[in-house]
Image (tube, helix red, strand yellow):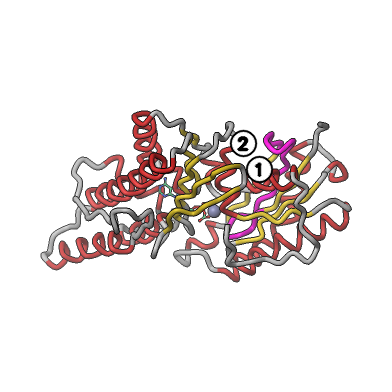
Amino acid sequence: VSDYLLLAIETSCDETSVAIVRNGREVLSNKISSQIDTHRQFGGVVPEIASRKHVETMTLMLEEAVREAGVELSDINAVAVTQGPGLIGALLVGVVAAKSLALALDVPLIGTHHIAGHIYANHLIGDIVYPAIALVVSGGHTEIVLLEEEGKFNILGRTRDDAVGEAYDKVARALQFPYPGGPHVDKLAQEATEEVVLPRSWLEPDSYDFSFSGLKSAVLAEINRSRMKGETPDFSGLAKGFQQSVIEVVTGKAIRAAKETGARQMLLCGGVAANRGLRERLKELCEDAGLPLLIPPNKLCTDNAAMIAAAADLKWRRRQFSSLDLKAEPILSL
Ligand code: KG4
Ligand code: ZN
């Protein structure tokens, strides 16, 4: 088989990213422009501003990705793009850019699912062994996915309210950290000596679903209780308590899913996979269970286009191309 180059575009939320990947696995470039500094002052992502920023930055990211990869645009064999889920206006910018490129270069277009991208980020660092369980933890998603075979996704459980990252960001705000607060809570939790013990939300014994809004409320209630009594809330103890509760539940459910499905591998992915406590605990549990574990480096965990190329590669190899009337889909099933 001769070499092929996929150019991928990701704009589902607040990162404008373009990557060029050779043969589905070799990342030649993965340019990411984050809009976090712009959105921080609003305490979260403002959709309309995100769309405008994507428009402003897209051409630059494209040029840089091509330059850094040391290839010519005319060498590209297919253009992949995140079709959904995500913010509609943000997705549209990527989809329109990808269609224009595919048309101009006369190469196939490959619409890709954002979560398939997070999962297949693991394919950029190692071989996936099926069946595998993927624990997807990001700002918008919390899912346990069974991959029975390549490209076959079966969602065993998902959050019923907040995504893990969303809960982290809300708790971080209560602890007076700027957006996105996940990494700050992680750091404070690691430094804490005392732990304020908070509830674990296991839901029904056989459920793989999650719920984090009660835990988030417990943190807020604890802060209010301290203030009412004229005491200083124990921020670091709360950060640790929150983090411990999240980690115990998500890793506990993921390991149970692996055991019950006879999975041969565990995959961790999504922005919250950058969490140190989570990575370490999952590593321990997987070692105990004799389960190989893949975790991408942080840059491939948070939103990026290389992971979209990795997921698009499954479709490239099967010649599953999209037509030029591909639509951006804010809600899209895996
Ligand atoms: O995957 P991602 O970049 O964007 C989405 O697709 O949502 O994930 C971003 C989320 C944010 O909520 C951020 O606070 C969280 O990942 N995050 C973390 C850490 N690093 C990023 N949460 C906890 N601990 C971290 N170290
Ligand atoms: Zn994401």
Residue shown at the point (45%, 46%) measured from the top left: 135
Give coordinates of residue 10: x percent, y percent.
Answer: 65, 54
Which is nearer the N-term, disc 1 or disc 2? 2
* Mark 1 closeness class: few <14, some 14–19, many ≥20 residues within 10 Å: many
Picture quarter with the N terminus: top right
Residue shown at the point (22%, 49%) measured from the top left: 237
Give coordinates of residue 184: x percent, y percent.
Answer: 38, 49
Q: Is residue 144 magenta?
A: no
Residue shown at the point (53%, 37%) measured from the top left: 296
Q: Name the residue beneath numbered marker 1.
A: 310
Q: Nearer the viewer, residue 140 or 63?
A: 140
Cα gap from disc 1 to disc 2, whole angstroms: 7 Å
- Residue type, numbered disc 2: Leu
Residue shown at the point (65%, 43%) measured from the top left: 310
Q: Secondary structure at mark 2?
A: helix
Magenta stretch: helix, strand or loop mostly: strand
Picture quarter with the C terminus: bottom right
Q: Which residues are magenta?
A: 10-28
Give coordinates of residue 35: x percent, y percent.
Answer: 57, 57
Q: Secondary structure at mark 1?
A: helix
Single out the residue that lies furthest toward the bottom. Answer: 48
Confirm or deny contact between disc 1 and disc 2 (CB under 8 A): yes
Q: Is residue 17 magenta?
A: yes
| Left or right placement of residue 156 versus residue 82 in this view | left
Picture disc at residue 280:
none
Q: Name the residue beneath numbered marker 2.
A: 124
Q: Nearer the viewer, residue 140 or 49?
A: 140
* Mark 2 closeness class: few <14, some 14–19, many ≥20 residues within 10 Å: many
- Residue type, numbered disc 1: Ala
| Left or right placement of residue 133 versus residue 56 in this view | left
